[in-house]
Image (cartoon, coloured by chain):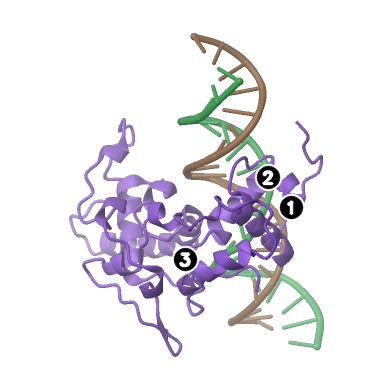
Chain colours: A purple, B green, C brown
Amino acid sequence: MVRQPYPKKGTWTPDEDHKLVAYIVRYGIWNWNEMPRFAGLQRSGKSCRLRWMNYLRPNVRRGNFSREEEETIIRLQKQLGNRWSAIAARLPHRTDNDIKNYWNTRLKKRVILQNNNSASSATTETSFSFSVEENSPDADSLILPNIPTMADFPEPLTYGTTFSSSGCHQTVEIDNSYSMRETFVSSENYWEIPSFLEQPLIDEGFDREALWYSHHQNLYDPVNDFWVNPLV
DNA sequence: AATGATGACAACCGCAATCCA
DNA sequence: CTGGATTGCGGTTGTCATCAT
């Protein structure tokens, strides 16, 4: 196996993003370790995977956590602990890294503050600790009432109806019944990008990358940086 | 204006889990 | 079954922007 002896590190450049997206659009994901070499990137496979999963992958939403999302994170963190991937699985469009960062930089402090306040108010509330036994054999088997999963979104909407913007304000509402259903497209459905991988690898006049973006441009919400087009 | 402190987030590292020949 | 390769996860660090002094 041939590896880059000193893979590049640090912030990704737009050109690197472009190369990675273009490669995945054209050839798909087959082997993260080998992919960067073929894509012309001097990055480790790990770095490419992280970049794709957290930022370049369509349907990834960043920043601007709603009140409901914050409450869900706090509740799940209380139930599951720092199992960010499990928490992310219950928050459509959010990545574990994003949730982890958000918790560490904002929510954790808030929760500690609230706990201090509630403790000083001399209620019978217990301290903010896991409600799950730490030695629980399988916390995934827990019943989590009111928490949606992929199965809760059986009828994904078409891309064109996913988002709309009005001026500087996102129009999608997230109500108490967790109507993020409005914004959700199942991963299964999502990857049914028509014929990308069935196309010949080299096809004059067929701009696969442009077609890919054209399929997903309706997902982009410039206000909330919902899937940033890396080519811009 | 310069500089240090702080916050937010992107990215890396090490390890565990999983895959597969 | 086994061991190396690959992927996934969570903790941590690095970097940059903003704010306070």
The answer to whether residue A127 is seen in the rendering is: no
Judging from the image, mark 2 belongs to the subunit labelled: A
Q: Amino acid at mark 1?
A: Lys
Give the alpha-carbon distance from disc 2 to disc 3, as whole Å: 25 Å
Q: Amino acid at mark 3?
A: Arg
Question: Counting other residues with Cα less than 10 Å from the Cα at mark 1, is it few (<14), some (14-19), or many (20 or more)?
Answer: few
Q: Are marks 2 and 3 on the same chain?
A: yes
Label 1 element class: loop
Q: Position of residue A158 (x, y in %)?
A: 36, 68
What residue would you read off at disc 1? A9
State how many labels appear: 3
Q: Earlier in the sequence, mark 3 or mark 1?
A: 1
What residue would you read off at disc 3? A61
Q: Quadrant of the C terminus of chain A?
A: bottom right
Q: What's the residue at 21%, 44% (across, down)? A: A143
Q: Nearer the viewer, residue A15 or A224?
A: A15
Numbered tag placed on residue A35 in the rendering: 2
Give the alpha-carbon distance from disc 2 to disc 1, as whole Å: 16 Å
Mark 3 or mark 1: which is in front?
Answer: 3
Q: Are marks 2 and 1 on the same chain?
A: yes
Contact between labelled residues 1 and 3, with CB atoms less than 8 Å apart = no
Q: Is residue A26 above or below residue A215?
A: above
Left of A128 or right of it: where is B1? right
Residue A112 sits in which quadrant? bottom left
Judging from the image, mark 3 belongs to the subunit labelled: A
Q: Are marks 3 and 1 on the same chain?
A: yes
